[in-house]
Image (tube, rainbow, N blue to C red):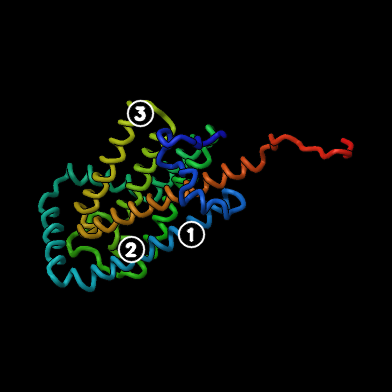
Amino acid sequence: MDDIRYRTQFDNRSLLDPRPDGPASRVGRHFHGPIRAWAATTLVGFIVTATALIGLGMLLVAEFLPEGVGAWDRSISTWFVAQRTDALNSATAVGSMLGSTFVVIAIAIVVGIVLAFGRHWLAIGFLAAGLLIEVGAFLAATLAVSRPRPSVPQLDVAPPTSSFPSGHTAAAIVLYVGVAIIVWTLTNSRVLRAFFWAVAVLLPIFVALSRLYRGMHHATDVLGSVVLAAAALFCAVIVTRVSTATVVRTAHEAEPSTDPVVVEPGVSV
């Protein structure tokens, strides 16, 4: 199979591989083809993630903010404004850009092309599912949870979406952590694994701090984006496991039978 290898021994399975008798394998038996499995499970992942995120956002705005969390948010935003310098303004502009829609899409396309050359279709599906679930749930939450942005001078042009959650931060986590998971799955190189995990940790932190520094989000918006990204990645893992199970089942069904042919007496062959 020219893709993420399906490992039949427990010790050799990766995060994206389903257990032979696990829930993902059982669900995968109900789909005719990996594309249908991917689409259906991605849709379910979006619905679950969006519902949970909207509930979290409404709870935050209605219950937690009036009870003191709002004052903490304002103090964080005010503190960042007091730290502003020309050098930090320039650095955080780069950090904010690394989580922007165009940069995330561009990097995802490049990663997808590289994976396509290696015929790693399930890895592409994993990254695509994570990003689609993230952006879909983000848009749903910004429409349902109308939280204003921090009341401090903002260094970026505010998009039409509301403050909760931070789309830049969530997209950065899903993209860079997703790529690190793929690299971990496809290679045994410790150097490559360490490098991509360092990027996966440091760049989202840089993006999150940049968005706070530039007055574009409250601290709780960033925390909400961490929850969103974690949920999107978790759902993407489930999507990939179900899709992989469907691929394996389809491949097994397509293999010619090796059972001996039983010929009853008197039947010519």
Q: Quadrant of the N terminus?
A: top right
Circle 3 SS class: helix
> Could you tell me how far apart the alpha carbons at marks 2 and 1 are, in whole angstroms?
15 Å
Q: Earlier in the sequence, mark 3 or mark 2?
A: 2
Circle 1 SS class: helix
Q: At 28% across and 63% down in the image, what residue appears?
A: 163
Dot 2: within a 10 Å radius of its alpha carbon, few (fewer than 14), some, or many (20 or more) residues? many
User: 18 left or right of 247?
Assistant: left
User: 82 left or right of 249?
Assistant: left
The image shows residue 132 at horizontal and vertical percentages of: 44, 54
Reply above or below: 41 against 109: below
Q: At 65% across and 43% down in the image, what residue appears?
A: 253
Q: Earlier in the sequence, mark 3 or mark 1?
A: 1
Q: Earlier in the sequence, mark 2 or mark 1?
A: 1
Q: Which mark is residue 43?
A: 1
Q: Which mark is residue 168?
A: none
Residue tagged by mark 2?
Answer: 53
Amino acid at pointer 1:
Leu
Reply above or below: 253 against 60: above
Residue tagged by mark 3?
Answer: 192
Reply above or below: 226 against 197: below
User: 266 left or right of 206?
Assistant: right
Amino acid at pointer 3:
Leu
Pick the residue in front: 112 or 230: 230
Pick the residue in front: 160 or 186: 186
Pick the residue in front: 107 or 27: 27
